[in-house]
Image (cartoon, rainbow, N blue to C red):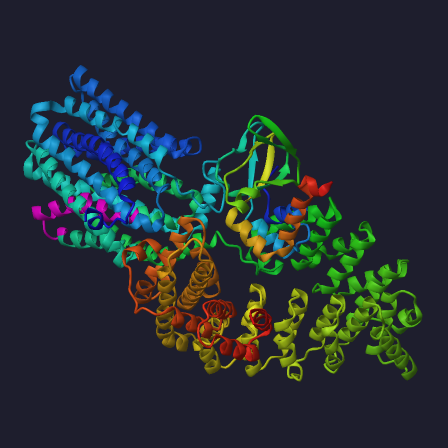
Amino acid sequence: MKQLTLIDKAFLLKKFSIFSVLDIDLLLTIADKMELERYKKGEPIFSVGQEGHRAYLIVEGEVRIQKGDEKHAILFPFDFFGEESILSEKPRRYSAVSEGDSVLLSLGSSHLHAILVECPTVASSLLEAYANSVEFRGR
Amino acid sequence: MLRKLFNLYPGEGKTATSFLILGFLWSLGAFGTLTLSEGMFLEHLGASKLPHSYLLTALCMCLLSTALLFSLHRLSIKHLLALILCASTACILTLHFLLLLTDHPPWLWYLFKIIGWMTPIAIYISFWAFIDQYYDLQDAKRCFCLFNAILYLGDAVAGCLISFTLKYLGIENLLLLFAASILSTLPVIYFISKKMPVIQEASPTHSFQKRTLLTTVIRLILKSPFTLILMLFYFLMQLIVITTEYSYMEAFERQFGDTSLTEFLGSLAMWVSFGNMLFGLFFYSRTVTRFGVNNLILLGPFFFLLLFSCWVKNEAFLFATLAFIAREGMIYTFDDNNLLLLISGVPTTIKNHVRIAIESFFEPIGMCSGAILLLLLPQQNKRLALALCLIIMVVVLFLRFHYPKAIFQNVKQHAIQFKKSVADWIASFSLKELNLCEKSALHHLQKGEEEIRLLALEFLLQMHTPHHLSFLLHQFETFSIKGQLKMIDLLSQSPYAKEPLIVEKMTLWRHDATLPSLRSAIHHYFAQHQLMKKEMVIHDLESEHLSLQAAAILFLKTSSVTLTQSLKALEKLNRLLQSSLSEEVATGLSILGQERRKENIRTLFPYLEHPSLLVARAAAAAIFLCSTPGFNAFTLDLIEVVKKRTDGEIRFHCLKALDLLCTEQEAIALIQASVTLRNAERKSVERIGLRAERTALLQLTQDEDSPISVRLLAGRIFGKVAPLEFKLHQKKLIRKEIERASFYLYQAEMIRNEEDDHDLAILKDALFTTFRSLLDFVIHLGSISQTGDESDILVCSLHHKNRKIRAAAIETLEKTLDPEIFSLITPLIDEKRRRLTKQSLPPVTLTELLETLQKSPSVANQIVALTLQARLQLPNWKEALKTKLTTGDEIFQHFAHELL
């Protein structure tokens, strides 16, 4: 993937469920704070116990989530991860490893907090994503 | 005692000692090798060969800095430091064996000189990058000079050793000693990294341990004027260092010849290092705290300027000695310490890259350039230095100017400001960025998901590129009905709404449109832009489709038609407004809105209280469309709506209407009603408030009975409306609020944490909250004139969880506020310093404290005070509660009923 322009990043964000309802003004503002990161196959993105300072959005490739040696989940493009540590202020509870070559957009903790405060729709989309991922509520 | 002498805070001693041991051990070895190399070079090859050695060293340093930059992306700072220390030891040991095994050929002295130069520089860079991980800017101001001072102690002890033991131990054994000293730092590094927690670099971008492209580094450097000036300044300082060193070495050689020069240099280095150490240990931290690093940076260049101004005219040996002191003293005590603090102004991601560039890359380039200049102008070295000093003075003034801005820029990187529109973004792009974005948007418009294509269309329409219009319109057929409706809406809002090409296309689309929703959207478009023709809509008045009917009513009501048609339209409209279906009522209201007649507001207003949110929102939107400046019969009522309705959309439209309707007095009423508004809504009020009267704004800012958020808003507007008048009242106002904030803080800190006492915990919390609100108010007021709308960012950063961001925010505050105000505020924002300077205020009883809280404008404080008064059965609590019941707001009344 070539270097992305601001408008590319903003359009990419629109594809993620948590940002899908935002208008272009907000998308551009958030995209401006997003960092494009590339990982090679098997390269760790973060490990258990590390302090969490960034949340990640998968643009290309897949990311393996694991606790210890056990494979927990595979995340695909337009999934996001790593925000739990920022919100809970606790160390990472799982490791994230790039399954193949992957491209991610990452967002710093202070920016994530600011977005949640200023864009209630993002906060509610995040809650919706959590609600969908909590198994006993889904049953 | 010792801790106070070194300006350390309680609990910092252990950490500081570890770094002091580390610094002493490596500096003894590295600076000892450096001093030996310089003395040996002069003794064996003479000063005339110095320019050659500079060139060679410069070349090697370039290689070293490239290697360091390369390693930065691959190794952690801890491992980088350990690796450099091991490599330095190996180099010194190699020298030791070469001295033992060869008959000292000239190249050996060159090699000695090169290794002597490179060792301290490489260790120095990684040492400071290592320490930087453990300190924030404010702690760095107090502690870094200590660590720098210990390096001078190492240098002094090394000078002393050379001076007194060279004759007995010989160079080879001294080198062995220095190598051992450097190697012994490894266990200390291991201990520090195991036992001490690192403060995470709150980088707005990814940690630099992840690969940062060289182009990204260069782009960031070029984007930061401060970084550029900082690099230029230290490059020029490197030139002046080389020129100065050459000048005094030349003078020393003339004075001493070949004999006893090394001993003289050793003893002089020892005394200068001793002086540096004393200054670093006891004075630098106090000086920098008092005067600020932005003022201290002037000292070095000024001293050099003064020195060379005199030395050019007078060849006295005193000036050579002073030059030595300037080079070995001023540079180390001021410029190096200053750089450790100034580097905080560099964007966080490239901080270590810039450190390496300045410390190792500029050194060789400066050396190389200096050597070339000295070779070109052999007899003009002092004049050259004088010219350099003058240039440096200019550069340092720019640096001083940009430093506070750069620190604040870094603070700002951690915040997001949601106030830029697409048009603002487009305006902020460079031509190249704009071209790239245009290409990208055109690409997205043709491919991909419809939602993204519509975003691309919106972006391109905002770009004001009429040459794309035909292409954009061509996309209409490729969209789904939903997309086509959105496209019509976007075109309607665009600056090209009345372009003949669009009107022509709309007519064509209307002709082809089979779906009522699409036809009605086009009809609305025509009606809105007065492009509708009667025959287009006359039959739609009886249509089953609400939107088609609405477009017909709107047209008939806004065009010159027959009385019968007009009355029929009115009747249809009234039927919609009286309907039991919210959708029909909302459509009726939006027709009234699109008529844009101020008289309609009277009809629209009651619908704001409608139980259906859809209707209330439509009423608010219509009121905005009908609002006309000067028609203010409903302004105060609208302000009440803004105050009471919590829905963001209703507030948004009402505030837009108020922007058109508010007069001077009503603007003040709106500011007073802003307590419950959200940040973005307050920004609208701030804009409307600009028309308020100065005196009223000042009174509101000073009014202690008004909520702090209202006073702050009034203060911000006052600062914008009358900046000079604001400055006149600013100090007095801030001083008073600092007093109040100190009172609340003191009382909160006086309450001990009793585990089971829930009431006391609530009281403590209320006092702390009031203190924080007052402190934020003070910071806002103090920084408005410098930071303007961005004082919010400063306040948020002061509460940030990351220590480095908080420290940078304090630094910005120091540079922004009046020094007197800053010194008053410091104990309130710096908890460590507050603990050291415990203040004592006259004691107050709990009853008095609760009475103060009860009188506070904050409803939360009043509730806490009255609850505690009731629980403690203090006299007159019921009377106080009853009074509040009659005067307090709704929330208070609910609470009072519960308590009674």
**Image spot of residue B591 (x, y percent):** 80, 73
| Most common SS among magenta residues | helix
At 85% from the left and 66% from the top, the residue drawn is B547
Residue B330 belongs to the span the image colors magenta:
yes
Q: Which residue ends up furthest to the top in the rendered image?
A: B101
Observer-nearest residue: A121 or A139? Answer: A139
Observer-nearest residue: A136 or B824? Answer: A136
One can see residue B365 in this view: no
At 18% from the left and 15% from the top, the residue drawn is B101
**Image spot of residue B80 (x, y percent):** 37, 31
Task: Give the answer, above or below, for where B123 lies relative to B631.
Answer: above
Residue B175 image-quadrant placement: top left
**Image spot of residue B182 (x, y percent):** 25, 28
Residue B883 belongs to the span the image colors magenta:
no
Observer-nearest residue: A86 or B266? Answer: A86
For the C terminus of chain B, which image quadrant?
Answer: bottom right
Observer-nearest residue: B105 or B652? Answer: B652
One can see residue B456 in this view: yes
**Image spot of residue A97 (x, y percent):** 57, 31
Tell me where the magenta segment starts and ends, as one range: B311-339
Relative to residue B226, is residue A129 drawn left or right? Answer: right
